[in-house]
Image: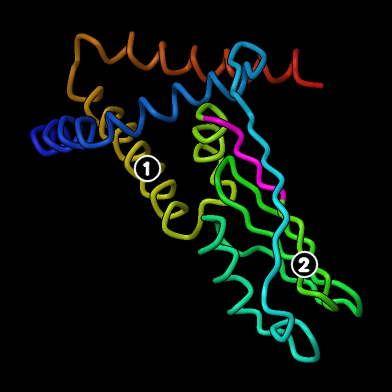
């Protein structure tokens, strides 16, 4: 059991090292947003599409593909609202939004695209905001790997008789410190 736990701990640690580093660094950037500036860039564009696409029956696919092709709009389609006089289309991605307001009578539209910068991108990936199902699986797999690394390390301490007591005391002290910090400082 000790040899298996050691092998598991070593290789899971190395496998998850990059993701652990990513989540550690982005934990700091999230907790201290005032330390990091992220250059936000907003672009506003006017355009026109085929009015037949938005007259009686709205051709959503054609509208979305036109916007992607004509303006390199990225992100996932998050909302497509159809009203009597206008349509609104929203795209979202990590550190990215694009909102379009479209006149149904003429096919004219106003597009506002915002890119929030590299640090905002990292922070959104850390939180899984607007990053899709596949990235959610990456986050879940990362959490599973870190849990297995922690548990295999805990199993290993029981095979190190000289370090068992000090290891368990350190474990308890760390858990107690987190609890006390929560108890005293979290409103």
Q: For mark 1, does the 10 Å Cα neighbourhood hold few (<14), some (14 to 19), or many (20 or more) residues?
A: some
Q: Which residue is mark 1?
A: 142
The magenta segment? 112-117
In the image, what residue occupies the spot 64% across and 29% down?
Answer: 40
Q: Is residue 94 above or below residue 158?
A: below
Rendered location of residue 41, percent (x, y): 63, 33
Quarter where residue 29 is shown? top right
Q: Is residue 59 above or below residue 174?
A: below
**Count of marks placed on residues:** 2
- The numbered mark, 1 or 2, whose residue comes first in the sequence reads 2
- Name the dominant secondary structure of the magenta segment: strand
Residue tagged by mark 2? 108
Position of 135 with respect to 177 (left or right) is left
Please state the horizontal and vertical placement of residue 70, each as a whole percent of the image.
55, 61
Up-down: is 151 above or below 51? above
Question: Which residue is outermost to the left?
Answer: 3
**Is 26 located above or below residue 73 in the figure?**
above
How many C-alpha atoms fall within 10 Å of the one at disc 2: few (<14), some, or many (≥20)?
A: some
């Amino acid at each position: 059991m000790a040899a298996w736990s050691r092998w598991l701990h070593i290789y899971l640690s190395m496998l998850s090292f990059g993701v652990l580093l990513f989540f550690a660094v982005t934990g700091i950037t999230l907790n201290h947003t005032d330390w990091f500036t992220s250059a936000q860039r907003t672009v506003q564009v006017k355009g026109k599409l085929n009015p037949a696409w938005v007259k009686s029956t709205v051709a959503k696919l054609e509208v979305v593909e036109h916007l992607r092709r004509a303006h390199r709009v990225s992100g996932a389609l998050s909302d497509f609202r159809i009203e009597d006089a206008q349509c609104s289309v929203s795209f979202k991605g990590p550190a990215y939004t694009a909102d379009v307001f479209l006149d149904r009578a003429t096919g004219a539209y106003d597009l506002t695209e915002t890119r929030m910068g590299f640090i905002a991108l990292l922070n959104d990936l850390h939180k899984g905001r607007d990053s899709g199902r596949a990235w959610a699986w990456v986050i879940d797999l990362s959490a599973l790997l870190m849990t297995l690394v922690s548990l295999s390390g805990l199993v290993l301490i029981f095979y190190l008789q000289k370090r068992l007591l000090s290891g368990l005391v350190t474990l308890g002290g760390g858990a107690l410190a987190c609890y006390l910090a929560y108890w005293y400082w979290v409103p």
